[in-house]
Amino acid sequence: MITYALMFAIGCYAVALLFNLYRVVQSPGVTDRVLALDTMAVNAIALLVLFGIWEGTAIFFEASILYAMTGFVATVAYAKFLLRGDIIE
């Protein structure tokens, strides 16, 4: 039963990534693109965790933590760039 639940969840997050990719390409503003990229990072983290459960290894969980930190820093840096025009003052 857990196998079917994992397959369903992986499919849902894969479709969500496709919708986010569409939003990145067809969004009206830059802020929408930043939000879509941040949501893509969250969905990718969820996929990494699901693959970790599927395989039963801890390496996917460690990779998801690293990806979460990198995605957060990238989102904050891009938002700061949009607001102020430079990242490093």
Image (spheres, grey):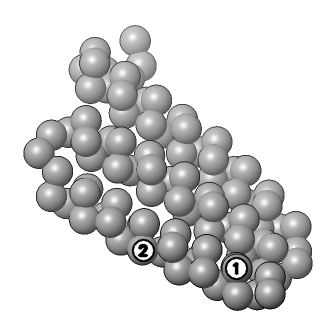
Residue at 26 percent of width and 56 percent of height: 24
Residue 29 sits in quarter: top left
- Say how many tags the image has: 2
Q: CA distance from mark 2 to mark 1?
A: 14 Å
Quick check: 70 left or right of 88?
right
Residue at 44 percent of width and 46 percent of height: 38
**Residue density around tag 1, few if under 14, some if 14–19, many if 20 or more, within 10 Å:** some
User: Label 2 belongs to which residue?
Assistant: 15
Residue 61 sits in quarter: bottom right
Residue in the foreground of this view, choosing between 83 and 24: 24
Residue at far left of view: 28
Numbered circle sitting on residue 6? 1
Look at the picture and state if 86 lies above or below 27: above
**Residue density around tag 2, few if under 14, some if 14–19, many if 20 or more, within 10 Å:** few
Look at the picture and state if 31 lies above or below 80: below
Q: Amino acid at mark 2?
A: Val
Residue 66: % across, % down = 69, 51
Residue in the foreground of this view, choosing between 47 and 80: 47
Which quarter of the rendering shows the C terminus? top left
Q: Amino acid at mark 1?
A: Leu
